[in-house]
Amino acid sequence: MQKIEHSAGFRGPVGTQGSGVESRRVLVAELAAIAGLSVATLVAATVVSVGMARASVADGVIDNDGGLFAIALMLGVAFIAIGGFAVLMPGPRRPRH
């Protein structure tokens, strides 16, 4: 009986090998997914930024308590940086069988 290892993404089980056409199709699907998610993230960030600018959210927060806003802003930047570094770090190595 074949042991099936589950993995996330567009690739099939580890033991199966596809033809060159299948691997190209997988590559194109992965690139399309990455491009689509990148564009959607940029659009969402732009919409939120424009909405905040029109609503003058920062002016209301800064006028009341600028120190607290600065701390919250720095914590947000730190969390984003930690997430970015976590994505760049290699995962645990699995032994090949």
Image (cartoon, helix red, strand yellow):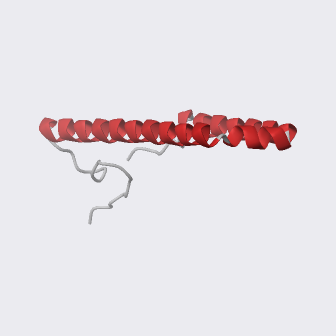
Between residue 46 and residue 8, name the one nearer to us: 46
Q: Please state if 29 lies on the left or on the right of 84 as rendered.
A: left
Residue at coordinates 66% horizontally, 40% vertically from top-left?
A: 56
Residue 9 at least partly seen:
yes
Q: Position of residue 66 (x, y in %)?
A: 84, 37
Between residue 21 and residue 28, name the one nearer to us: 28
Residue at coordinates 23% horizontally, 50% vertically from top-left?
A: 16
Q: Please state if 14 lies on the left or on the right of 55 as rendered.
A: left
The quarter holding residue 73 reads top right
Residue 71 at least partly seen:
no
Q: How many marks?
A: 0
Residue at coordinates 49% horizontally, 36% vertically from top-left?
A: 46
Between residue 31 and residue 68, name the one nearer to us: 68
Q: Position of residue 11 (x, y in %)?
A: 29, 48
Q: Position of residue 69 (x, y in %)?
A: 79, 40
The quarter holding residue 86 reads top right
Residue at coordinates 38% horizontally, 53% vertically from top-left?
A: 7
* Quarter containing the N terminus: bottom left
Q: Please state if 66 lies on the left or on the right of 19 as rendered.
A: right
